[in-house]
Image (cartoon, rainbow, N blue to C red):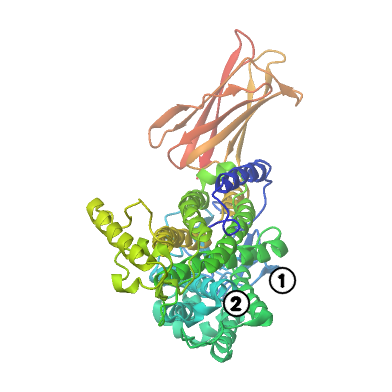
């Protein structure tokens, strides 16, 4: 429910907000520069796919950002699937973005597999594997799990409790904000109090579960290891564990405040007690607690790594608090609209207006902080459709737009309710005898209630009431009189409340969907990270390009030289081929035609035409597909004039 000032008529604010959102998105993504937002492997020694003549003494991995790792973070497996690193990994030379293990002294020839699993700076585990060979490549029996870190029993449980934690935060913050800022008397409604306690309890249970599961989640361990004292101790000293413990301490402080503050008590309707007064200090303390709880997420997840961390963390905290105020407040509003309390207490229209203003401000904060976080984590328009994070974000934006559409109906219903509010106790009060409007309350009171008045006015009123009831029955609408009068203010107010309940309930359901998508985003690698990792693989993990230089001699002056063929990455699959011709004196030479074919004679594959194209100084192709590893023969045709050409041969090993 997002409205402007109480009582304002419907306007085009939702459309204006959407236009502004689109404009800001265009500015942000149109001019976004590349930056790191998540840890990725940037290089290794030995390199992926390399062939070494002598056994290495150690294996070192370098990442784009600082990492931490459990004892089993780095494993080096021999061709026979035997572990050859006797000790756990350590940071290399004290650098926080490295991991190094020492190898055994005697290593036989063959292909070795390096499997790694580390914890990124934002708290998410990442894993991978690569190979290198000693002497020459060989078959290997090593097996490495390639499944996602979250695709395990522990990972799925961890994801469930992460969602439960977000839900608990939304209920706790939203219910507290509704009570403190919109309708203090709501603390006397049992369902609202239960909602407040349910949010607190859900957050406590989820936090304890996440603390226990953190150890096996990081190390890919079993569920039974959740109570391992060594892993619990490691978790307690790590960044996520400290955040969990801080969150529990803040929740205990919140429980003490709810338990002992004199204003937090059931209020009986009609007992003459004034509405509870929480005071400015209590409201400020509640705001500080909400921000503190949100910061326990910001300090241990995406906001804590990447660019602009000092700005990203408070922005992420504000985003979470605004989400809780809006979504949890909506759920509280639905309950307050349905529950009348022990004494028939009705939610006053003024409280609806206050929440309308609060919800509008919360959504404004959500839009602003969400735009910044989207720019920080996505970085480009292409990433919106080219990465899992971007596609999930698009779904979330679509869900938010649907929420705004539904919210426009809530706004209209709230505006109608605010234009003609009915006091909370009007339905329980007996109408004054002389008020003619009692004729509109068909069936609300018997004829004997319409009495009093001078000059026979009571009889006249009774007659009009009877006539109106008869006409209403004849019309079948049950809400008009003989003169066509509409429903009473009480009935109109109740009708507005029913419409508001329906639209706010629909808005709350969609908000839960948005919350679920948000939880999924927190466990997804950001788009900037995916781009960074792809670049790292292309630059740091690919083996050296294969370079073959073949001399040629046509038997005439100035028709001697050499042709240099470069294949990158020189592996099975797609390759880039560049060819340069050098003259006899070593300078670059231009030739009218250069052809290259590749053949693997052992397997009977080829010749494959590389289809080189003249690039004004060199010849190249960028999509040569090589289907098999092994020794390939290069057949190169160099034509220097219309009648002079020569065919030369070379070999290259594709891995």
Pick whichever, 317 or 85, lies toward us. 317
Q: Crowding near pointer 2: few (<14 within 10 Å), some, many (20+)?
A: many
Q: Is residue 548 left or right of residue 425?
A: right
Q: Label 2: state its secondary structure.
A: helix
Q: Crowding near pointer 1: few (<14 within 10 Å), some, many (20+)?
A: few
From the top left corner, tell me how far across and down residue 188 is, in percent.
48, 82
Is 573 above or below relative to 319? above
Q: Tag on residue 613?
A: none
Quarter of the image for residue 54 reads: bottom right
Q: Earlier in the sequence, mark 2 or mark 1?
A: 1
Is 284 above or below relative to 272? above
Is 221 above or below relative to 249? above
Q: Tag on residue 243?
A: 2
Residue 134 visible to an observer of this rendering: no
From the top left corner, tell me how far across and down residue 114 is, in percent.
52, 62
Residue position for label 1: 94
Q: CA distance from mark 2 to mark 1?
A: 25 Å
Give me the residue at 56% from left, 84% from top. Answer: 274
**Cβ atoms under marks 2 and 1 closer than 8 Å:** no
From the top left corner, tell me how far across and down residue 281 is, in percent.
68, 81
Give me the residue at 66% from left, 46% from top. Answer: 28
């Amino acid at each position: 429910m997002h409205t402007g000032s109480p009582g304002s008529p419907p306007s085009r604010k939702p459309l204006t907000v959407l236009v502004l959102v689109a404009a800001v998105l265009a500015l942000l993504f149109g001019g976004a520069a590349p930056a790191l937002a998540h840890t990725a492997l940037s290089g290794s020694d030995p390199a992926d796919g390399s062939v070494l003549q002598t056994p290495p003494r150690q294996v070192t991995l370098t990442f784009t950002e600082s990492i931490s790792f459990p004892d089993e973070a780095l494993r080096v497996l021999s061709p026979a699937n035997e572990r050859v690193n006797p000790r756990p990994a350590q940071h290399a030379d004290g650098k926080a973005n490295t991991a190094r293990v020492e190898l055994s002294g005697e290593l036989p020839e063959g292909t070795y597999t390096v499997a790694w699993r580390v914890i990124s700076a934002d708290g998410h585990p990442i894993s991978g594997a690569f190979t290198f060979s000693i002497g020459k490549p060989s078959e290997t029996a090593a097996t490495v799990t390639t499944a996602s870190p979250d695709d395990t029993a522990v990972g799925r449980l961890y994801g469930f409790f992460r969602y439960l934690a977000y839900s608990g935060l939304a209920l706790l913050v939203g219910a507290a904000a509704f009570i403190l800022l919109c309708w203090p008397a709501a603390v006397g409604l049992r369902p609202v109090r239960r909602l407040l306690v349910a949010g607190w309890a859900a957050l406590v249970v989820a936090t304890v579960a996440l603390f226990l599961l953190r150890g096996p989640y990081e190390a890919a361990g079993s569920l039974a290891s959740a109570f391992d004292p060594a892993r619990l101790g490691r978790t307690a000293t790590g960044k996520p564990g400290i955040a969990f413990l801080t969150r529990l301490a803040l929740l205990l402080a919140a429980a003490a405040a709810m338990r002992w503050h004199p204003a937090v008590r059931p209020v009986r309707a009609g007992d003459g007690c004034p509405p509870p007064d929480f005071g400015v200090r209590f409201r400020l303390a509640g705001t500080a607690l909400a921000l503190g709880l949100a910061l326990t997420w910001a300090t241990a997840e995406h906001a804590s790594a990447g660019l602009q961390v000092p700005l990203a963390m408070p922005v992420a905290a504000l985003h979470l608090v605004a989400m809780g105020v809006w979504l949890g407040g909506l759920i509280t509003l639905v309950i307050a609209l349905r529950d009348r309390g022990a004494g028939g207490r009705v939610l006053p229209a003024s409280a609806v207006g206050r929440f309308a203003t609060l919800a509008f401000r919360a959504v404004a904060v959500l839009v602003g902080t969400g735009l910044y976080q989207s720019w920080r984590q996505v970085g480009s328009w292409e990433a919106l459709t080219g990465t899992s994070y971007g596609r999930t974000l698009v779904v979330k934006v679509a869900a938010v737009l649907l929420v705004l559409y539904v919210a426009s109906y809530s706004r209209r219903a709230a505006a109608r309710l605010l234009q003609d509010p009915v006091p909370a106790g009007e339905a329980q009060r007996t109408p004054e005898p002389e008020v003619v409007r009692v004729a509109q309350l068909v069936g609300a009171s018997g004829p004997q209630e319409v009495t009093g008045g001078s000059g026979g006015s009571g009889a006249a009123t009774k007659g009009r009431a009877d006539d109106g009831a008869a006409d209403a029955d004849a019309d079948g609408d049950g809400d008009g009189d003989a003169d066509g009068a509409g429903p009473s203010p009480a009935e109109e107010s109740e009708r507005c409340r029913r419409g508001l309940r329906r639209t706010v309930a629909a808005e709350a359901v969609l908000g839960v969907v948005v919350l679920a998508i948000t939880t999924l985003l927190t466990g997804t690698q950001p788009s900037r990270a995916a781009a960074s990792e792809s670049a790292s693989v292309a630059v740091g993990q690919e083996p050296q390009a294969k370079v073959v230089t073949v001399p040629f001699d046509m038997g005439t002056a100035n028709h001697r030289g050499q042709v240099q063929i470069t294949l990158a990455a020189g592996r099975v699959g797609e390759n880039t081929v560049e060819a340069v011709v050098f003259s006899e004196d070593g300078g670059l030479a231009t030739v009218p035609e250069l052809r290259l074919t590749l053949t693997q004679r052992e397997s009977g594959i080829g010749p494959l035409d590389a289809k080189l194209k003249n690039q004004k100084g060199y010849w190249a192709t960028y999509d040569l597909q090589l289907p098999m590893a092994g020794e390939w023969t290069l057949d190169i045709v160099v034509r220097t004039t219309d009648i002079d050409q020569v065919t030369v041969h070379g070999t290259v090993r594709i891995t």
